Amino acid sequence: MTVTVSLALLLGAVVFLLCKYAGLRIWHAAACIILGFYLASTSFAPYISQFTENIIRNL
């Protein structure tokens, strides 16, 4: 759970910085967030979570 919260905060900070400095528009970020919510309710969610955990463990 702590990895998930930390990762969510890190990704939130990255999105904020991209909106502020790299020209990412709020609409683009909103579309990515909505896509994330839809992906979380699909059958791919466990695989995405496992993939993310494997990447974090190997860092």
Image: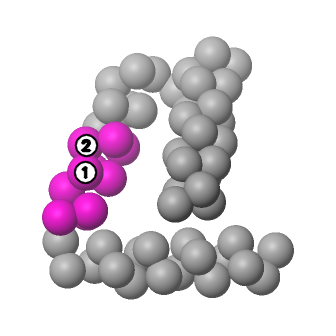
Q: Residue 48: horizontal and vertical position, in percent?
A: 42, 75
- In the rendered image, residue 38 lying in the magenta stretch gets the answer yes
Give amino acid for label 1: Phe
Where residue 42 appears, as percent x and y from the top left, is 18, 71
Q: How many marks?
A: 2
Mark 1 lies on residue: 37
Residue closest to the far top: 20
Left or right: residue 19 compared with residue 44: right
- Which element is circle 1 on? helix
Q: Is residue 46 found left or right of 25 in the rendered image?
A: left
Packing grade of label 1 (10 A; few <14, some 14-19, many >=20) is few
Q: Residue 15, position in %: x, y?
A: 56, 33
Classify 10 Å Cα crowding around label 2: few (below 14), some (14-19), many (20 and above): few
Q: CA distance from mark 2 to mark 1?
A: 5 Å
Q: Position of residue 2 (x, y in %)?
A: 60, 56
Task: Please say if 34 is above or below 41.
Answer: above
| Residue 17: quadrant of the picture | top right
The answer to which of 6 and 34 lies nearer the viewer is 6
Q: Main secondary structure of the magenta part?
A: helix
Q: Which residue is located at x 63 percent, y 16 percent?
A: 20
Above or below — where is 54 with respect to 31? below
Q: Nearer the viewer, residue 15 or 56?
A: 56
**52 lies above or below 41:** below
Q: Is residue 39 visible?
A: yes
| Amino acid, disc 2 | Ile
Q: Quadrant of the C terminus?
A: bottom right
Per the image, label 2 sits on a secondary structure element best described as helix
In the rendered image, which quarter is residue 28 located in? top left
**Image disc number at residue 34:** 2
Which contiguous range is marked in magenta?
Answer: 32-41
Left or right placement of residue 4 versus residue 55 in this view: left
Residue 18 seen in the current view: no
